[in-house]
Image (tube, grey):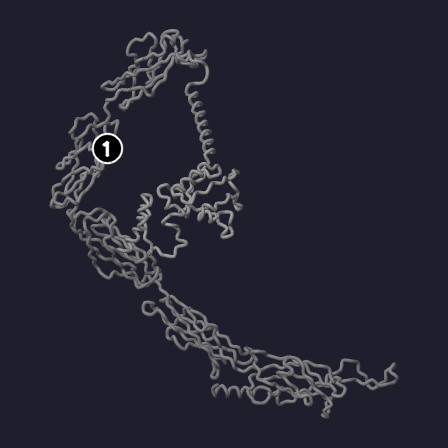
Amino acid sequence: MTIQQVLLLLLLWMWLPHPCHTEMLFRRTPDLRPKSFGGRASGNDGKAIHRQKRGWMWNQFFLLEEYTGSDYQYVGKLHSDQDKGDGSLKYILSGDGAGTLFIIDEKTGDIHATRRIDREEKAFYTLRAQAINRRTLRPVEPESEFVIKIHDINDNEPTFPEEIYTASVPEMSVVGTSVVQVTATDADDPSYGNSARIIYSILQGQPYFSVEPETGIIRTALPNMNRENREQYQVVIQAKDMGGQMGGLSGTTTVNITLTDVNDNPPRFPQSTIHLRIPESSPVGTAIGSVKATDADTGKNAEVEYRIIDGDGTDMFDIVTQKDTQEGIITVRKPLDYETRRLYTLKVEAENTHVDPRFYYLGPFKDTTIVKISVEDVDEPPVFSRSSYLFEVHEDIELGTIIGTVMARDPDSASSPIRFSLDRHTDLDRIFNIHSGNGSIYTSKPLDREISQWHNLSVIAAEISNPKDTTRVPVYVRILDVNDNAPQFAVFYDTFVCENARAGQLIQTISAVDKDDPLGGQKFFFSLAAVNPNFTVQDNEDNTARILTRRNGFSRHEISTYLLPVVISDNDYPIQSSTGTLTIRVCACDSQGNMQSCSAEALLLPAGLSTGALVAILLCIIILLVIVVLFAALKRQRKKEPLILSKEDIRDNIVSYNDEGGGEEDTQAFDIGTLRNPAAIEDKKLRRDIIPETLFVPRRTPSAPDNTDVRDFINQRLKEHDTDPSAPPYDSLATYAYEGNDSIAESLSSLESGTTEGDQNYDYLREWGPRFNKLAEMYGGGESDKDTS
């Protein structure tokens, strides 16, 4: 706080009343009850009634905010006239802040504020005071309400709701144009002094802008401010209370002001003359180049429209305005020819599309430039005399006849010779050909309009000096009709005549067609090739004719079929005719003329089904029989799969039974002792773990003698299985480890062998005969392999 502000506060303090130094006595107020002036009232036993008076003196308390002293701030004093100073009365305070913010001395009635008070938080406090007797605790005065009002001091500076404002104003605005209004607020009491009276001033932004002191409206201060020179301005506004006087508090804010654009600048071409080049072969619509006029304005104020206003190429070129780049694109409007004209001059104008009438005095808002376009020479392809050709030719012309000629030239000044050719993709049958030198098209195969009426050819022209530069032209060949086809029946006619027909009866109406197409339309004539006693032809003169009978009654037993030749001719030149033969069958008809039967053999066949139906029924029966027989055969031939699938080498087969044995305790499934000693074979017993397949009782086979050879032993067992009805119905291989008592090889099993394969010598297997050669090779070969390794 500055010295000036302190002095101002002291001055205000001296002017204000100071309740803290004045004892606020409560005056007695007259009692509203009826008063008695010393007389006795009846009904009260002669006792005198005295008037009671209130003992309060009452005033409003005032307290200055923002007290900075170290002691409690004195507010005021409550005193009753019944207080004799002997301490018999007790003062009680209640209401807003009583006991916390405001405390009272019970004996003296002095009220103090315990802390600093801010008026902006609460402007006044309402409390209630009462004086009671300490001994009886009865009030000596009724409870009264009073207010402590907080006096304001200038302790709040003006504040703006925004730290930074953004505003805009059009450029070239007149002096005093309103830009934006800023408003500050002050939390001090506006009804007490000048603490909340705000005055605005500008600290930064002069001399371009000014501010109204009372309203805070910012206005332009200079005329014709140009955005193109400066666009952004920063203005600092100060708001100061106390009416702007010295010692007042202040706050500031920043306003960023932007000058918006207006159309105050015309477009300008940077060059007075622009040169462009374009090849003469450029197609129509090709962009040659662009022109652009600059405009210092922005947005729509800088939009420019281009147009060609003068020059010797106004009909050869166009200009289009490109909106996104504001450029004028010059394009080719008509085909160019270097040999005809090599230089064009255009006058192009650029004009603003949005002109502000306020700034007409700065115009005109348009500019012009000269555009010179040079046409460059290129090696152009040949040019045909026409864009397309149409030739008409009769279909009966001779081979090699010229049907027409195409012409082309070299547009360049060199005038190179031209060579012509046909695109064979358009003439796959090679019906036509062309003379490469003069472009004459002639036929190489006969023409037939009835096969193809139009031929669409493509002729290629190329310069001899530059064969890759070619031009194509379509050639349409129309084949004209010649009467070279005879008429014939339109359809095949299935004609019959009833046996009971009468003379002059219509049996068929015929018509004809012709592949030719004469100019006057088709016209046919019908007649008989020779006089026929049975039938006649009557021409209807509408390209149809009727076939009529000439006699009564026909018999299919005598003649079942008649052949009637009919001559059909046209009326074109030369006249063409053909003979068509009608086959007329004689049929039996009912009384209405409906055909019933036309074949003579039908009378001999009995009534019933036709031969085809009988054959179909017989085939169905045979197929059903075959299906039944196959089904029965498959049902009878239910066989199990053999255990051994390959008969070539039984050593390579592994037979899986998927039957788990009972281990050592399974004495019923298999007895290993039988393999070791055939003499110990017991009677076969049925297995208890599976259901037997047959009910035949296994028979006991005699044991083989001790000196039986292995071969005889196996043959004997095979014979027993073949004759055993309880054996399975397929061959099986049983391997036995018993070799006989006198075998020099003893047992072949390796279960009881204590030696390894490397210690065995299998050469003796070769001495056993050819049946053991395979074993000898297998085991003997392993020995040799081991030696070689």
Q: Which residue is mark 1?
A: 455
Q: Residue 576: where, in percent of width, then height?
A: 25, 18
Number of marks present in the image shown = 1
152 or 368, which is in the foreground?
Answer: 152
The answer to whether 388 is drawn above or below residue 324 in the figure is: above
472 or 703, which is in the foreground?
Answer: 703
Tell me the SS state at disc 1.
strand
Q: Which residue is rendered at x = 22% and y = 37% of the image?
A: 425
Q: Residue 113: where, in percent of width, then height?
A: 61, 85
On screen, residue 45 versus residue 160, left or right, reads right
Residue that sits furthest to the bottom in the current view: 86
The answer to whether 124 is drawn above or below residue 329 in the figure is: below
Q: Quadrant of residue 499?
A: top left
**Residue type (three-letter) at the residue carrying disc 1:** His
Q: Which image quadrant: the C terminus?
A: bottom left
523 or 201, which is in the foreground?
Answer: 523
The answer to whether 596 is drawn above or below residue 424 in the figure is: above
On screen, residue 596 versus residue 26, left or right, reads left
Q: Quadrant of residue 716?
A: top left
- Decide: few, some or many residues near mark 1? Use Cα within 10 Å; few <14, some 14-19, many ≥20: some
Q: Residue 243: where, in percent of width, then height?
A: 49, 79
Q: Residue 38: where, in percent of width, then height?
A: 83, 86
32 or 620, which is in the foreground?
Answer: 620
